[in-house]
Image: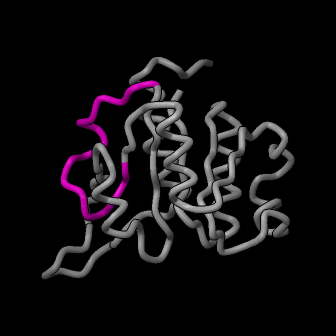
Amino acid sequence: MPNVVLFEPQIPPNTGNVARTCAATGTGLHLIEPLGFSLEDRYLRRAGLDYWPLVDLHRHGDWESFEHRRRQHGGRLVALSSHADLPYTRFQFLTNDWLLFGRETDGLPEPIHRACDARLVIPMRFAATASQSGVRSLNLSVSVGVVLFESLRQLNQLTC
């Protein structure tokens, strides 16, 4: 089963909503610090409702700590970025992928982009370009849901 990784998330309700999605799918959630909030934040807890005990939650003190763990477990690091060219729908997910999502305000730093095995984009009809205004990105929790469910669909890991 893929893992969801949030790099230095900043907005508590987004992380709470991602945690609820991970609880519903049985997906591991990895948070790379520093976080822009406390895990005791009431908005975070509220967004995750009473599902927090169902979340397979892992905290990493920094990027290096996360990378050490990922290397021990193996698998590809797959970044989601508005700067990527390959749509997530044209990518073949594997069960041990690590789905990496950046900060809500500024995404992933370039050195982390370079460390990834693949970089994917969620296509948008009215996406912003260098010469045209439009939507820069989707909400973090929406992005996680879209990509995670596609990976689970491909891997035949959705049950009804």
Name the side, left or right, on which 138 lies relative to 43: left
Taking the magenta stretch, the answer to whether it contains residue 91 is: yes
Taking the magenta stretch, the answer to whether it contains residue 156 is: no
Horizontal and vertical percent position of residue 41: 82, 69
Tell me the residue at 58%/62% (across/down).
Answer: 62
Tell me the residue at 45%/25% (across/down).
Answer: 95
User: Bounds of the magenta span?
Assistant: 79-95
Name the side, left or right, on which 52 lies relative to 109: right
Tell me the residue at 38%/36% (across/down).
Answer: 76
Quadrant where the C terminus sits is: top right
Name the image quarter holding residue 124: bottom left
Name the image quarter holding residue 123: bottom left
Name the foreground residue: 67 vs 9: 67
Residue 2 position (above or below residue 146): above
Tell me the residue at 46%/63% (across/down).
Answer: 102
Name the foreground residue: 94 vs 137: 94
Residue lying at the far left of the rendered structure = 131
Horizontal and vertical percent position of residue 96: 46, 28
Horizontal and vertical percent position of residue 3: 54, 38
Tag count = 0
